[in-house]
Image (cartoon, rainbow, N blue to C red):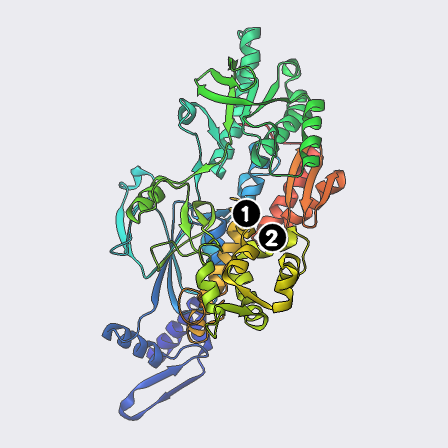
Amino acid sequence: MRWNSFYTKASKAFHDHPSISKLLIVFTVSGGGLVAATNGRSLYHSTYADAVQQDGDYKKKKVVVLGTGWAGTSFLKNLKSSSYDVHVISPHNYFAFTPLLPSVTCGTVEARSIVEPIRAITKKKGLNIEFREAECYKIDAEKKVLFCRSSQDTNLGGREEFSVDYDYLIIAMGAKSNTFNTPGVEENAHFLKGVEDAQRIRQTVIDCFERASLPNISEEEKKRTLHFVIVGGGPTGVEFAAELHDFAVEDLAGLYPSLKDYVKITLLEAGDHILNMFDKRITAFAEEKFQRDGIELKTGSMVVKVTDREISTKERATGEFVSIPYGMVVWSTGIAPRPQVVDFMKQIGQTNRRALATDEWLRVEGCDSVYALGDCATVNQRRVMEDIAVIFSKADKDKSGTLALQEFHEVVDDICERYPQVEIYLKKKQLKNFSALLKKTQSDSQKQSAELDIESFKSLLSEVDSQMKNLPATAQVAAQQGEYLASCFNRMEQCGKYPEGPLRFRGTGRHRFHPFRYKHFGQFAPLGGEQTAAQLPGDWISIGHSTQWLWYSVYASKLVSWRTRILVMSDWGRRFIFGRDSSRI
């Protein structure tokens, strides 16, 4: 019976713990000790590693990732090294495909179709990654400690607070909407930064139609209630205006036939044009299409106040103030740092900045063990002219005071890699390489001498820094930064021994890694009516229905899992066949 009981327990253990089935050898050694070796890590090795870790001789570096947005999730997906003890802290236990948020606001796509549980993403990695659903409310850079509180409802026993120490910190907390301290925006406007925002907008749109359909509502009140105002003519504001127009015309007009003539959509933009980061051809097409669709576009209108029933603007052309009654306002005017990030910036001396400043390796300036990615950070690219003297000195190996062409060519690649504005400048001037620039700027006497002095070297690079630009706050940038940083962490030890980066002009040796370089793959602007504008590399512009299908295919391929791809594509199919759902749930 005892053997039968042992067999039953052993069988149950094998079924409950499949990893035990990887057991290869079980044998006894002197003294009756038992050693079990698996295809991964032996029990002896595990015990030994734990003992060594307790002795302090060996310990994995603790990496804490704040945020599960594009940057944080991209880092986790691309991290392959098991040399780190990884902890993820975020108030959201999922990753959201934010480019489809405007589609969620009107039911084109369901909210759950664009989210993937972060634990499902990390589970596929096969690494020991711990997740905590909590909000980091304070970063102590000096002590390397994070202070966090849980984000669960208080009826579960109150908000729990805890602290987490770290060896490396990766700040990928994103940003909040920038209200520019406009009175009433926080209290009365909707934002479109997350899934919850999109769901609130969807419910409010339906609420506006249901309220306007009540029998005792006056004509004026119906017009006010069904007036939807979008503030901000960037990609998010434009796409939401287009989605809302399609929703009202294609679906709600049939369900609320008596209200279709009261619906009005207004887009306010403080600048001269919408989509000013796109090619002028796209901007012009978008403005013409909105005019045809009946979307009122008011450029040069700066919002000065928002109440619960009216939005006040100042017209730049005339200087007059205008009050606009509305039923719903959506605020989409750029981003600002979160309070936790602002507090951290003050600690490290980065006050009066719009985002955390990092170097070209995404390290926060002044904190070697802290990295910042995505919307909460900006790469502070060094200027060539700031380092021109040390670059010249480094290249002048014989200390002659002049650069021979051979000396110059030996540092050209390092200059181009360390200062990306050089390459941008060459492309703008339609020059193939640095040598072509040198030939173009040299005088006849300089060409004959085949040497450069410091003044000639300064003159050669004097206009290069004019090409410096901050990276846009987009999902594309954040995802590439996360992938880059994961690659650095995967090769941390290897590149520590064999540095692969450019020369250190202010020091000796080479940088450990190649600096981060953003590669732009293009951008889309959905304009409604199954039409989309695309601006792709090489100044290639595409506008129309065919581009909409390109948009479908690209976004479907970029979704984080096959589960979300299938769900989103089924939502698109459902919308084509049955229309958008207008239920308020």
**How many marks do you count on the picture?**
2
Going by the numbered disc 1, the residue's amino acid type is Ser
Going by the numbered disc 2, the residue's amino acid type is Tyr
Does residue 255 appear in the picture of this structure? yes
Task: Using residue 23 as the reference point, say whether residue 158 is left or right of it.
Answer: left
The part of the image, by quadrant, that contains residue 187 is: top left
Residue at 47 percent across and 36 percent down: it is 196
Q: Distance between the residues labelled 1 and 2?
A: 8 Å
Residue 305 drawn at (x, y percent): 44, 19
Residue 482 drawn at (x, y percent): 49, 56
Contact between marks 1 and 2 (CB within 8 A): the answer is yes
What residue sits right under mark 1 in the picture?
A: 466
| Outermost residue, front side | 445
Instruction: Name the quarter where the N terminus is drawn.
Output: bottom left
The part of the image, by quadrant, that contains residue 84 is: bottom left
From the viewer's side, name the closer residue of 531 and 412: 412
Q: What element carries label 1?
A: helix
Report crowding for label 1: few under 14, some 14 to 19, many 20 or more residues within 10 A (C-alpha).
Answer: few
Q: What element carries label 2?
A: helix
From the viewer's side, name the closer residue of 368 and 562: 368
What residue sits right under mark 2 in the picture?
A: 425
Does residue 585 appear in the picture of this structure? no
Report crowding for label 2: few under 14, some 14 to 19, many 20 or more residues within 10 A (C-alpha).
Answer: some
Residue 459 drawn at (x, y percent): 55, 55
From the viewer's side, name the closer residue of 444 and 503: 444
Residue 92 drawn at (x, y percent): 42, 45
| Outermost residue, bottom side | 30
Dot 1 or dot 2: first in sequence order is 2
Q: In this view, does 441 lie above or below 30?
A: above
From the viewer's side, name the closer residue of 163 and 14: 163
